[in-house]
Image (cartoon, grey):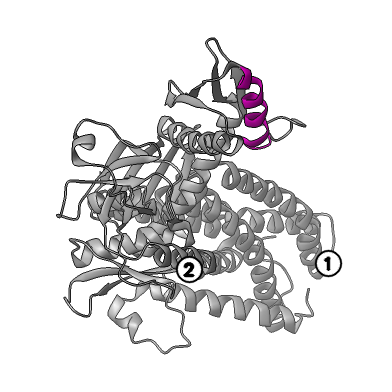
Amino acid sequence: MMNLARWKVFLVLLATILGILFTLPNLLPANVRDRLPPFMPKNTLHLGLDLQGGSDLLYSVDTAALRNERLTNMAEDVRTTFRDKQIAFTDLAVANGEIGVRITDPAQVTTALNALRQTIGAPLAGVPGGRDVNVNEGPNQRIRIAFVPEAFDAETSKAVEQSIEIIRRRIDQMGTKEPDISRRGKDRIDIQAAGESDPDRLKNVIGQTAKLTFQMVDETASPEDLAAGRVPPGDEVLPSTDGITASYLVNKRSVVTGEMLTNAQSTFDSQTNQPVVSFRFNGLGSRRFGDITRQNVGKRFAIVLDKKVISAPVIINPITGGSGQITGHFTTESANDLAVLLRAGALPAPLKVEEQRTVGAELGADAVHAGTTSAIVGLAATLVFMLLIYGFLFGGISLIALAVNAVMIVGIMSATQATLTLPGIAGLILTLAVAVDANVLIYERMRDELRAGRTLIASMEAGFQRAMGTILDANITHILSAMIMFQFGSGPVRGFAWTLAIGVLTTVFSAVLVTQVLLAWWFRTFRPKTLPIA
């Protein structure tokens, strides 16, 4: 230790300088940060919802709507299968969480059952030869099709995970930094958007399913039939928001879907200068869109968003370039929000708001003030304790190491754009309060070696070497606890765990290496005959 290796000095100086550089932006006003040279770090700590205010929304995935949508799509597959097999049927409908259909010819019931069991549904994971739906024969030549409970539970779980990722992309594109999105229970999602002052706009962007489809308009049915509720098989009546008509009769089959979009941007129409949404398809979507428009020149196709027709233009010429525009009664903001939704993708199922809270920034200011006060009080108590027990030299060296530790923690959290929450402040205070434990272990070990009759140099060497095992054991258990909390916790717990994990690493570095370098420099400079703590 007394050799004072150059790499140790260099590492301590580098860590301290970098810690100061990355901590500094937190102390500067925004206009000063903007004028910093390009090579200077400018990232600051993100304050969590409990520190700067924002919106806290709790959603649940509408599993009933999810089941109904899956069954409705499956019913169209049933219709296609029977037509391909030339099986006559009636009363195909979705009701009470299952599909029901009646086979007209009793001799074809077995053929229909076999055809559906081979084509409907998907393989069931973990069950060789099993499928995710049950196809059963009922009385009066009826067939019932329903999801296997385990399969639908897996479908619900998948929908929740997909919804979380889509919500995160939507909020990120709105410019909100570091939203905290976590799963709660079986089908609930908690969203904390710090700094988002408009919860209504946030709900509009998050909660809209944004399922975009392109469906052909069926203009063959007479108004009298539609007024009487006689909708042709394979068609559906959808309400319209285009201001031209109240509703449209469209084919249920979607010719192109929003999943085939590669980009969507809010722009302005070159002729009317009105806000529109420009979109572009991928290769598959471009081919399908080109084929459909080529085959249906002079007909209308409907652009449908969440089961509402937002535009139904007439196909004048084939559209083969793979791009187009969505027109409607848009404002600049609504066109931009729609573009955000389309870029992020459609939710697999509708979301329902279960709870909404708006946290004011005043609470955050009080929390920051209380946290700062407690940190100052804690550090002052630590300062007094170390100076009284170990004197101005060794106690002062411990406090210098503690200051380097604090700078490194804030610098690392700023560099990684970590979100600081109120529990995170608690973790920071706790880390700083126990950081001197390593110094206490080292100093007490030095005292023991001196009492045992060893020389000053040997005592100092042994103080670091023999205390190291205990220091590592204690901090390894701390970091394992932090990792477990970060993995299985959510929101405030993860903020506390992240701060604690960073603090463990910086504490070992500062309490051991920084203290070692300072003590070695003191020893080489003053050549003491005794230790002040003896």
- Label 2, residues with CA under 10 Å away: few <14, some 14-19, many ≥20: many
Front-lying residue, 109 or 200: 109
Label 1 environment density (alpha carbons within 10 Å; few <14, some 14–19, many ≥20): some
* Residue range highlighted in magenta: 107-123
Question: The residue under label 1 is which amino acid type?
Answer: Ala
State whether residue 81 is above or below residue 530: above
Quadrant that contains the N terminus: bottom right
> x and y percent of residue 327 in the render?
24, 65
Horizontal arrangement in the rendering, residue 335 relative to residue 459 (left or right): left
**The quarter of the displayed image where residue 449 is located:** bottom right
Label 1 sits on residue: 458
Q: Main secondary structure of the magenta part?
A: helix
Q: Cα distance, mark 1 to mark 2?
A: 78 Å
The kind of secondary structure element at disc 1 is helix
Q: Which image quadrant: the C terminus?
A: bottom right
Q: What residue type is labelled 2?
A: Ser
